[in-house]
Image (spheres, coloured by chain):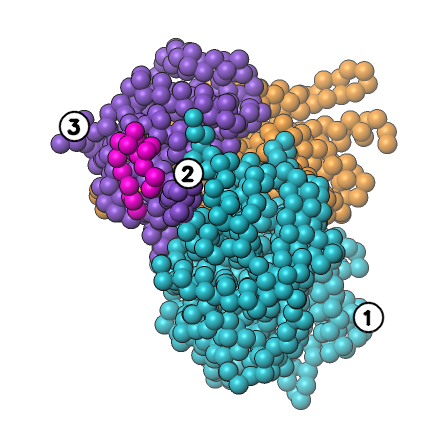
Amino acid sequence: MSGRLYFAFPAVVAVIALPLVLPFGWVSTLGHVGLNAIVCTGLVLLAGVAGITSFGQAAFAGLGAYTTAYLTARMGFSPFVTLPVSLLVAGAVGWVIGAITIRLSGHYLVLATLAWGLSLFYLFGSLPFLGGFNGISEIPSPSVLNADLADQRVFTMVVWACLLVVLLGCANMLRGRTGRAMRSLRFAEMAESMGVDTNQLKLRLFVIAAILASLAGWLQAHFLTVVAPSSFSVTISLDYLFMTVLGGAASLVGAVAGPFVFEFIRSGLREGIPQLLGVSGNFELLIFGIIMIVVLHRARSGVSGLVMGWLPRSVPKADPSAQPLDRRRGAASGEDFIKIENVTKMFGGFCAVKSFDATIRTGEILGLIGPNGAGKSTLFNLITGVAHPTSGRIEIRGEAVQGKPARIIAAKGVSRTFQHVHLQPDLTVLENVALGAYRRGRAGIVSSVFGLDRHEEARMMAEAQRQLDRVGLGKLSGEKASVLALGQQRLVEIARALASDPIALLLDEPAAGLRHQEREALGALLRQLKAEGMGILIVEHDMNFIMNLTDRLIVLEFGSKIAEGTPDAVRADARVIEAYLGPAE
Amino acid sequence: MSGDQALSIRGLDVSYGAVKAVSGVEMTLPIGAIVAVLGPNGAGKTTLLSAVAGSLPYGGTVDLGGEDLSGLSIEERFRRGICLVPEQRELFGSMSVADNLLVGGFVRQRQGRTEARSEREKVYQMFPRLQERRHQRASTLSGGERQMLALGRALMGQPDVLLLDEPSLGLSPLIIKDMFAIIERLRDVGHSILLVEQNARMALKIADYAYVLEQGKVRLEGKAADLAQDERVIATYLGGAAADAG
Amino acid sequence: MPLIVFTILAQDGLANGLVYSLLAVSILLVFLVTRVLWVAAGDLVILSSFTLATATRGDVPGTVWITGLLALAVLIANAAKHLLHGKEDTRWGEHILAAAVSAVAVLAAIFLVPLNPPLIVNVLITLALMLPIAYALYRLAFQPTYSASPLMLLFVAVAIHYAFIGTTLLLFGPDGYRIPPYFPGRLSAFSVSISYQVLFIVFLTIVVILSLWLFFSRSILGKVLTATAVNRRGAQLVGISPMRGGVVAFVISGLMCTISGILIAPTTTLYYDSGFIISLKGFIGVVLGGMASFPLAAIGALGVGFVEAFSAFYTSTYRDVIVFGLLIPILLWRASMLGAHHDEDVH
């Protein structure tokens, strides 16, 4: 994403200078587009990155606009003072609203943003001190060196300068450690297992989007010198959303392209249709609706989806000379690291795991097998904190962790892979692996935005590359994760798990989809990790693989442990054979 | 050539993205036979059935009684007489047992109410348990009853070919026995059945012919009675040396 | 509050609430069968009420353009699919029926309406004009994307809503519409007086809800539709195409929206862009019902009508803030119930 932006920036800089030469009518359009692009940037962060579709962005713009309008026109404050206040108010309201609604999912979340948007809109229109449906007028416009923001050309240049700063900051943010985690938010289960607090991160993005909308609102208020509720209605929110869809929510480029295309279609329709048909009338919305339906049918990824393929892509690379990341204090081999005591998991009346006991020791490979539906995945989820036991106790180094979320368990040195591979398909292989090291870094949003995280980034990338080399995929580090074969994707997951510097490694069917040689290599790697003192729990269906690899095997059937012991002992166990093949008569 | 085959599968390939889950599978299901598809977890059995039923795109051909089914949706295949009973059963949970059955027969008996009722009586005869429970919601049934209802609902469409995915999954041993007896009876009344099962011994007992899948390919095939004696079958489940132990 | 005020407010609430509940039921039906959040349902209500209002004045409603052009578009789209992809289309009977209904409706509207026929004829013409629209919208806009993500479907619905606003503005202008009550006068008993209009709304809503209930609990088609809503894949497995269900759901929903429009026409002044807000009031009911229960959705929407009426009395400026602000605690409550049952759903 970032490399494409370097392409886009000169264009944006050129646009900033454009108002000086363009005819007046065009300048006005350009300013309008830039203003919308600022809001849409927030929407790309929300919809494209975090997977939250907001139908209420116009209301946040309204918060910014009304805050400054009230403070300047009614209270006599200087507009320069009110800019931070506007952003703060929108950010604070966004934080409260986000904290309440962000946990909702799917249709509930969509409807919730709609409800907020509507409520705020009606509030603007009905609070007496905000001027009712007439709004607030005679807002002063700030001026510096004879350049007045109410002047069309000045306004347009200021808007595009703001947009440039916003885009740069967002691009930087998305590139860094926190940005990688943000870009994994749509894969929440995976992100949580990498130690990411997904709800908190979503909330931050929600607040950032609110602040961006509020910035646009502030600019608009001082340019128009009036604010009225109709500029912040849900219809306007829908416009922002359609711009983002038109541009393509998957990239920041879309945030700029969308408003352009939107404006082009809208004004084209407004002026073109009456000329074309020789009739005057309001065809604009009708035809716009039809065009949107066609776009949604034919080009779902928007403009940026169409052009992205042509633009060069910058691929983060690892510098091997970077200082290695600090390591966790290792565990002594043979330590009882995870203890599972009498754990039961019920789903309604169905008992998925029944009074299960096991110990995962460091320096040992423990296998977990059993027929389909035996409860292996459930058990895996219970240990990693994705699900919580109905009763029983799970300890990590003597500390009870049952009921704790996945990210807390990850932080204690338990790292995992997934049965159904969970990689971020749009990130490179290297970035995916670096996500595993999330907990080992500290850089947050602010340091990323200002590019202060270079040093730590280099260390993380070097670590990611080291782990990729280890699983034999070092050469593929620059590829997109989605182009890899399934077997390779599984290995990337192992590298990602290793990048977190775990004490225990939990592998869910790591050998599925691997070719014979790859299996051999995987086996060798796991043995080496064991020798280094790592504890490994492995669920696998390839019996040859697991029998040769493990020190100890546990067999599950109907949620209960039916056998435990060395592979040879388990293989000879009559109950095990019966579980797999049915009763012999 | 395929005159006495209910179903023939030629060169079937199914991929998930770049990964081949099933490759080059050749399989035939004679009319009025039970053919078992065995193999460990992840061998591609369910994928195979889904492709044949029309819910996954595939390469190769699937032939139903001589007609190539390429390009037909799952609904269109059902109308031509091929019905999948999936592992998840996919019942209409909030509807009564009786209504589940009625809906199952909708496509076949859309004209006649009485025809649908009489077809439902037949299903009740085969599964008296369902008749007892006919007013109960499907979601309140036990595992065995759910499987019976799934089968009964499929039968309402009078299919020639039944694709059964793990009918014994999650059932207790006693009910599994009943279930296999029912499957044998379905064959006896003329249905051709492709049976995916993990419970290899039981499946081989009632099947006429069997294929063993491993990593998406057919590893072994033969008469069920022969395969029941074949130690290589055990090996695919429990690893190389299992033969000595068993 | 004096009793007289109370009864007036209660009647207002009842009249609007019942219309909202019809809308809520129709939105929920569409959602369960097709996963579309049908935000344009309110626009259909508006269109229906404008159509009837224009017709009762003896003018040919502009709706004939929509009905006619959409019917044409469906025919062209089908022919194109047939010619370009060589796909055999087994639904010609259905297409011809839809086209015939559209043609009859358009002709009736053009030739009968100017003769100032009795109200009932105008109502029938309105129904005949509206139903093919709902049908065509599904065929043109949703059937091609029926496998798309719910969010995409929502966007398509919003785009249709845009198109509706534009069309209604174009054909009916920016003025508000309201027609005289069908049954003027009031019924007085025990010092309480109820307008006949409200009684009529109550009566018709009960009839519609009852017939809908009969349809779903007695008819095989209703059961098939329920089955599609309950488990799409299960329905496919027994040969029922989810697209068929979609068509039926859209047409039934179109019928209910039309009836809502006819009922609301004399009670509220409506504008070309009032549809979205009306839809949202229906949605509040849908959410109250957990996006699953028809009776709860209907009762919830009825409640919205009452809250609206009484909050308008106490604090008319904050009426809409209160109505939509209500949605948020309801959403949170529903979502928390979802969370509590989540474990069971997993299994």
Residues A343 and C133: in front is: A343
Measured as percent of width and height from the top left, residue A174 is found at 56, 71
Q: Residue at left 39%, top 12%?
A: B122
Q: Chain letter of disc 1?
A: A
Q: Chain letter of disc 3?
A: B
User: Which of the labelled discs sits on residue B246, or is there none?
Assistant: 2
Which residue is label 1 attached to?
Answer: A75
Which chain is the one coloured purple?
A: B
For numbered disc 2, what is the local secondary structure? loop
* Measured Cα–Cα span from mark 1 to mark 2: 89 Å
Badge 1 local density, few (<14 within 10 Å), some, or many (20+)?
few
At label 2, which amino acid type do we have?
Gly
Which residue is label 3 attached to?
Answer: B3
Which chain is the one coloured cyan?
A: A
* Measured Cα–Cα span from mark 3 to mark 1: 91 Å
At label 1, which amino acid type do we have?
Met
Give the foreground label among 3 and 2. 2
Q: Chain letter of disc 2?
A: B
At label 3, which amino acid type do we have?
Gly
Span of residues in magenta: B217-233
Task: Place residue B18 in its image quadrant.
Answer: bottom left
Q: Is residue B172 left or right of residue B77?
A: right
For numbered disc 1, what is the local secondary structure? loop
For numbered disc 3, what is the local secondary structure? loop
Measured as percent of width and height from the top left, residue A510 is found at 47, 56
Do callouts 3 and 2 mark residues in contact (Cβ within 8 Å)? no
Q: Is residue B189 left or right of residue C181?
A: left
Task: Place residue B45 in its image quadrant.
Answer: top left
Q: Colour of chain C?
A: orange
